[in-house]
């Protein structure tokens, strides 16, 4: 992750052994982070990333879902966390039922 001010970091293991980690930094605005944030939110189960949101330099803001990549429109850290947690609930329903 880039140097900047850490504004979000949480990591825990869920009830089925999946790893959930959310990390975000406030950084200077650049072409790759026009909103001034670098972030990575991920859910990994059995070594596989099932859900992820990030904005590394080559791809900008995007989300991952079961190996597919989709564009993502960043508006705020709160909205980012809400969107990630919503996808997390959906993927857990698919995976654990």
Image (spheres, helix red, strand yellow):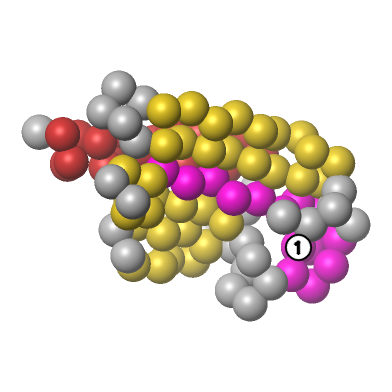
The relative height of residue 66 versus residue 95 in the rendered view (above or below) is below
Residue behind mark 1 = 33
Q: Position of residue 39 (x, y in %)?
A: 65, 50
Of the 4 image quadrants, the one containing the N terminus is bottom right
Quarter of the figure with residue 70: bottom left
Question: In this view, which residue lies farthest toward the top?
Answer: 15
Q: Secondary structure at mark 1?
A: loop
The relative height of residue 19 versus residue 28 in the rendered view (above or below) is above
Q: Is residue 62 visible?
A: yes
Which residue is nearer to you in this view: 17 or 24?
A: 17
Task: Tell me how many marks there are.
Answer: 1
Which residue is nearer to you in this view: 54 or 82?
A: 54
Q: Is residue 10 left or right of residue 13?
A: right
Which residue is nearer to you in this view: 14 or 65?
A: 14
The relative height of residue 91 versus residue 30 in the rendered view (above or below) is above
Quarter of the figure with residue 95: top left
Q: Which residues are magenta?
A: 29-43
Q: Position of residue 13 (x, y in %)?
A: 41, 28
Of the 4 image quadrants, the one containing the C terminus is top left
Q: Is residue 50 left or right of residue 23?
A: left
Residue drawn at 34 percent across, 36 percent down: 18
Residue drawn at 79 percent across, 38 percent down: 6
Residue drawn at 48 percent across, 27 percent down: 12
């Amino acid at each position: 992750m880039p140097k900047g001010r850490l504004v979000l970091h949480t990591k825990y293991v869920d009830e089925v052994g999946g790893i959930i980690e959310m990390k975000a930094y406030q950084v200077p605005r650049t072409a790759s982070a026009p909103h001034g944030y670098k972030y990575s939110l991920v859910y990994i189960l059995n070594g596989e990333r099932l859900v992820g949101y990030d904005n590394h330099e080559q791809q900008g803001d995007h989300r991952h879902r079961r190996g597919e990549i989709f564009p993502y429109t960043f508006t705020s850290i709160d909205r980012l966390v809400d969107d990630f947690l919503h996808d997390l609930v959906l993927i857990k329903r698919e995976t654990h039922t």
